Structure formats: C-alpha cells, structure tokens
Amino acid sequence: MQTHSTIETLQPKTWQLDATSRGLEGYLYHCVLCDEALVLSKHQINPQKIQILFNNICPGCSFGLDKVLGCRPSILPPGRRLLTNLKCPDAEMLLEPDDPLEHQTRRGGSLPRDLQPSITTGIEAIDKILILKKGQLVFLQGEPSNALSLLLCVRATLPPPRGLNTDVVFIDAGNLFDTYTIAQHITNLELDDERVHGRIHLSRAFTHHQVYNLIMDKLPSALDEYEARLAVVSDITALFCDPDVRDKKESIDIF
C-alpha cells in the first residue's frame, strides 16, 4: 500500500526546488532547455520511461525529451521517495522496490582498453570506443544508430574475431530495416547473399502492442529457435511515445 508521502507534486522549475541539505540523495530528471522539473526520485530511472510517460514532450517548452532530458543529483525531502511534475500521468509506474536490483551501466568509452570485443563494426574509430561483448544490452541513439545496427547484423554472421558466426533476430519497430543496405554490406564483405539473408530473421511491428508482444513473448523463443546470439530492436520507444497511447503499463514493463 502506498502512503500519502510516497508520491507528491514537484515544483515545476528546478530553481523553485527547496535548497536543503536534509533528506535522501536522489536524482532529478529535468529539461535542460527550460529547467522544467519532471521527476525527483530516490532511485535512478531509465530515461526512456520518463520519455514515454510524458509522450516524449517536455510540458514546459514542448521540445522532445529525447533531446533535452537531463539528470543531476538532488535531495529528496525526508520521507519522500518520488516527486513528479503536475502533468505526469501514472506516476506510480515509476516507483521501484526499496531494494531494487542494481544494474551496472557504463559508457562505452569507459571500458578497459584491453577488453576484446565479440563483434566489430570494421570501422576503427568506432571499434576503439564501442566495445561490444556477448551478454551486453547496448543502446545506440541518433540517426547513425540504425545504419550501424544494419552493419552489425551482417557482420554478426562472420566468424570470430570479426563476428559471432550467428543468426540475428531483428525486431523492426521503426520501419527502418533496409534490405538494400544489407545487400550493400554483404557485397562489401564478399559474403554469400542468400546465406546471410537467411540468417537475419525479421519481424515488423506497427503498434506498441506488437512491439511489447514481440519483445516480451516472442523474442526469447526466437533466440532459442535460431540459436541467435544477436538481437536488434530498432526505434524501440517510437510507438510507445505516440500521443494516442493511453495505457503506458506495457512500455514501462519493457524498460
């Protein structure tokens, strides 16, 4: 049961927050453009959850949160776990258990330089920064990320050390899968076109319900069926950020 003091309304602007040294250390998620305070939480929150709850729009300036969402340390008032912007719907979805499982997140550039990748892009400047290992969950953001994911799909079929010699499962949530680009990479790497295409297993999603079902229900069995060691989900948040999506529970469950 939630107590009255668990969730409260947050002052709309970061500079309106009470400056106090008393309380718990927390994390303030805010708009770096207009200083709109969105969420103040005891625990770290996946930024994509916040983007989804606010339909990826800052309530203060209407800019896309994928461009302007920031996070900084802040102090929670005593007895509080979560404070949210007045325009935040379903704030309870952001609540975490008191002792959540800690996930270790690291920037690619902070990984040890002697760490050997399981798969490479073949682009020296990127491979020095992006060290891809089996077992990692990697988020690539920005327009070039789609081109990079298509390249990795083809290179995953290469034998080690350049690739994984594996099949690939690709869930296309943004209508971004480009067979022409795949064919170009196959030609550049002098691979067999039919064989590589046969090792990339594509599923397209056109609604947020389909994205949820493909990831939560179909992906685990597909990885087993094809013995795939690489899964790619393109534009994973796009369909969940549609303003017509009323129920955010499925998207929060994923992230």
Image (cartoon, helix red, strand yellow):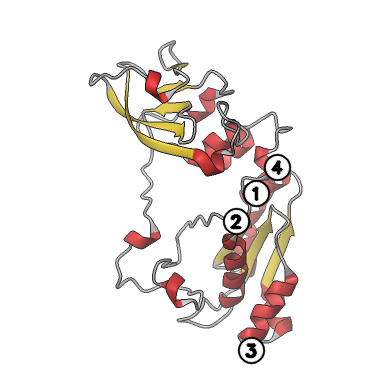
Q: Amino acid at mark 4?
A: His
Badge nearest the viewer, 3 or 1: 3
Residue 95 location (% of width, % of height): 46, 27
Q: What amino acid is at disc 2?
A: Pro
Q: Where is mark 1, residue-wise?
A: 217
- Residue 1 placement, left or right of 72: right
Closest to the camera, between mark 2 and mark 4, is: 4
Q: Dots 3 and 4: beta carbons under 8 Å?
A: no
The kind of residue on which mark 1 rests is: Asp
Residue 104: x %, y % from top left:
36, 50
Q: Residue 41 is drawn in which quadrant? A: top left
Instruction: Say which of marks 1 and 4 sits in front.
Output: 4
Mark 4 lies on residue: 208
Q: How far is the residue under mark 2 from the one under mark 4?
A: 18 Å
Residue 146: percent from the left, percent from the top?
61, 62
- Mark 2 touching mark 1, by CB under 8 A? yes
- Front residue of this view, candidates 223 and 40: 40
